[in-house]
Image (tube, rainbow, N blue to C red):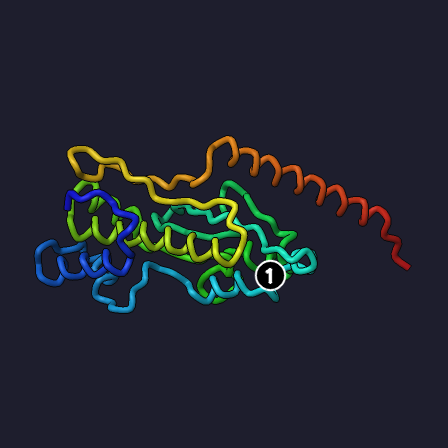
Amino acid sequence: MKELFDPSISSADYLALARHQHQTGTSRLNEELAWMLDDETYDCGLNKEHVEVLIYPHNWSAAVRDEDRKPRVFLHAQVNQKGNAQISWARGELDILYDEDFLKRYADAARSADSVPWRGLGELMWWRGFELLLGDVTLHKSPAATALLYAHAASLNELASYLARNVSLVGAMTLNFTYQDGEVTSVDFVPTIPQDQLQEMINERGQRKAVQLSEAVERMAQFRPE
């Protein structure tokens, strides 16, 4: 499959293409990845329940509701040590989190890796075997694997678009493809906002955390048990 990724094509259409190639034998997928195409309900690891919890206004802070605005969210993506991709809004190495825009109990639960059975509440998508899929695309040049990877890229973009309509999406991560002779040679998660703006958001988060820590220390110093 030498076609470049087309953001106008839906994840469902890319999945259908990958499934057709796999099932007809045009391009068989690695056995460890084939379950994604064998499962007719597979939707690129999207956790719809966690998404709906995020956009539910009753989980937003009183300040956000009083100011009649939406909470700020950065959609982060990274690959863990096991080669799976994690897409979340409350965790990640960039540490861009506006926890003051949400109820404390919800923000705390979203930051946890296992706040609910099996997955963390702040995780919105989980791509099992992501690095294995990349290998099938970049090394083995599998058309079915490429269509499946494109499906995940489209699904991530669709998630960002959905969030942008329901919260204040200050930034997100997307998949960037590098090509040679029409074939994918590398794939990376990249931010959708300029690097200087991203660094400004990271710095601002650090400043807010410092203020919060100072205020917490002050409250502890004023505490006088009976």
Could you say which quadrant of the image residue 27 lies in? bottom left
List x then y, in percent, for residue 135.
23, 44
Residue at the spot 53% in from the left edge and 33% down from the top edge:
199
List x then y, in percent, for residue 31.
19, 57
Residue position marked by numbered label 1 in the rendering: 106
List x then y, in percent, for residue 125.
40, 57
Residue 196 to residue 57: above or below: above
Residue at the spot 46% in from the left edge and 47% down from the top edge:
76
Between 30 and 5, the one nearer to me in the picture = 5
Residue 162 to residue 97: above or below: below
Label 1, residues with CA under 10 Å away: few <14, some 14-19, many ≥20:
some
Instruction: Say which element carries label 1.
Output: helix
List x then y, in percent, for residue 191.
43, 40
Could you say which quadrant of the image residue 12 lies in? bottom left
Residue at the spot 17% in from the left edge and 37% down from the top edge:
182
**Is 162 situated left or right of 170 in this image?**
left
Name, please, the residue furthest toward the left: 25
Between 212 and 177, the one nearer to me in the picture = 177
**Is 26 situated left or right of 217 in this image?**
left
Under mark 1, the amino acid is: Tyr
